[in-house]
Amino acid sequence: MGICRGRISRQPAARLVWAGLALLAAGGCAGPGSEQHLAPLYTHISLAEGGVEHEALAGAVIARRETLAGPLSTWGLRPFFLHYPDREERSRTQFLYPFGRVVRGGGEFNWWLLPLADYRSENTPEGRKWSLLSLPGVYLASFPDGRSTQAWFPVAGRVEELMTWDRLDFALWPLWMRSVRDGRVTQHILFPFFSFTRAADGGGWRVWPLAGHTWVDDRYDRWWALWPILRYAQENLKSSPRHRQTQWSVFPLVSQARQGSYTSTTVLWPFFGYAHDPALGFWAWDGPWPLVRVMRPGDESLGPLPQNSSHARRTRFWPFWSHYKGDGLESTWYAWPLVNKRHESYYEAERDTFSIWPLWQSFDRREADGSRLVYSKLWPLYQAERETDSAGEELRRYLFPQLNPLWRWPDLDQHYSWIYELYRAEIGAQTSQERGLWGLWRREQGGGEERSYISGLWSRRAYHDGTEAVVEHSVFFGLLRWRSTPSDPLDFLAPALPGPGWPILRANAPPSP
């Protein structure tokens, strides 16, 4: 071959050294426009769907392009971080997953590392809005109208439009706090002991745990004393007397709620409870909680049920068996939490699920547009998916083994499954991709070609050149390569160290623009 000339020692160790030097000297034979497959150290190959991939360190380092000349679409150092495009011109960068994430696009930028920090920015028609919440209790925000807020919990500060508050001021918390929600202003002193609420339509006060009173005109009037022992409340005050609700309790001995013909009574909370509405036929029994619960919905055509009741049907003898049906869900448990069978109905989808914890998980989700996803996992042996789009085209995915015991979580698999997976496949109508441990074995079929690889040792390329079928082989790091066709069974090709040296552009793939 003329790679190395001169006298070579006959000692086995020396021969290995000379062989290594020879391979390095010839490494330039496979240029940037051709493939190299030296997994788990480094891989540069053409992907079945037409892109290109660089991979190193068994899959820890990864960089992919969707087209040969396009920008990087997916890249990262797993499991530390991974960047890839999202839907609707958005992109995601996940780091220290599942704790850290960056989402950008559509005029938004969100960054968080739980539980340390959370930053959010949004371009609205009125201007830019952003907020930062981080440990140790720091909150900063700016609004399009020029307002800005700062807070350092528990020292002092103001927050706006956070969680359920319109505004929250505090100083030396819990000494003093002022909250605003829906026009109701509450002053807190030595929270939670003293508070006073004022509003145009109501008010309230609290001397905890002695007594407290809150009210909103035409909505509710609530009293309590010796918290949590004594409580009395009236709800739905604006409604007709039939739809108003009265509640009282002497905790934990007894409590009762009434609304029209509906009555609910609890004794020795939470162990025993009974509710019924003879006008609708609704009734429910708890006792002893959580072992036994029976609920029957009555006749839905007779009218809406009162607050805290349901049209659902439930029977539970925990942990042996339970059944629930209502609100688009039917679920049955056997030997909770081991076996569960459920059917869910959404606005434009249905899903059937069956699981035997922790060994088996499966579901079948059907969308209104005809698309479908069928999923199954036998932990820790394998995971399989069959996805069908609205046009009827099918894509199958396989993973063996699957050490993740949680429900389907593709992002988590992206970050961690490459470490242990012995076999992964994604097989569609036009393309298929298969991969062995750390990329030592791979198969990419698409773009008019089928390419198979065993790192360094062997590679095969099969395609049609427009005239006849062509099969090419490469062995020993591309040192020996040949082509076979019906018209020429053996045609030697030039070496392409470190191999296999196949061109990145596939035979029948259009060139990149």
Image (cartoon, rainbow, N blue to C red):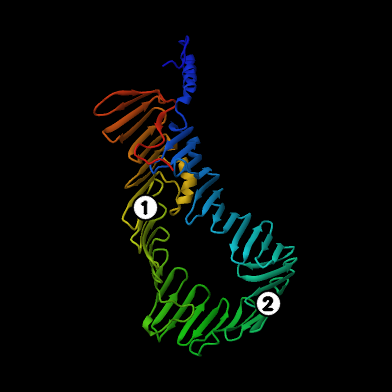
**What residue is drawn where x is 56% and y is 76%?**
252
Q: Is residue 377 in view from this perspective?
A: yes
Q: Amino acid at mark 1?
A: Ser
Q: Name the residue furthest left.
A: 486
| Residue 94 versus residue 204 in the image, above or below | above
Q: Residue 185, labelled with which disc? A: 2
Q: Name the residue furthest front.
A: 513
* 348 or 505, nearer to the observer: 505
Q: 137 left or right of 467? A: right
Where does the image place residue 242, in percent across and percent down from the top left? Answer: 48, 89
Where does the image place residue 260, in percent across and percent down from the top left? Answer: 47, 87
- CA separation, marks 2 and 1? 52 Å
Pointer 2 with pointer 1, Cβ within 8 A? no
Q: Which mark is nearer the camera, 2 or 1? A: 2
Instruction: Check disc 2 and report its element: helix, strand or loop.
Output: strand
Instruction: Check disc 1 and report its element: helix, strand or loop.
Output: strand
Which quadrant would residue 204 be assigned to in this image? Answer: bottom right
Where does the image place residue 127, in percent across and percent down from the top left? Answer: 62, 64
**What residue is drawn where x is 41% and y is 71%?**
327
Q: Amino acid at mark 2?
A: Val
Q: Is residue 40 in view from this perspective?
A: no
Which quadrant would residue 182 be assigned to in this image? Answer: bottom right
Where does the image place residue 131, in percent across and percent down from the top left? Answer: 64, 61
Where is mark 1, residue-wise?
Answer: 376
Q: 474 left or right of 404? A: left
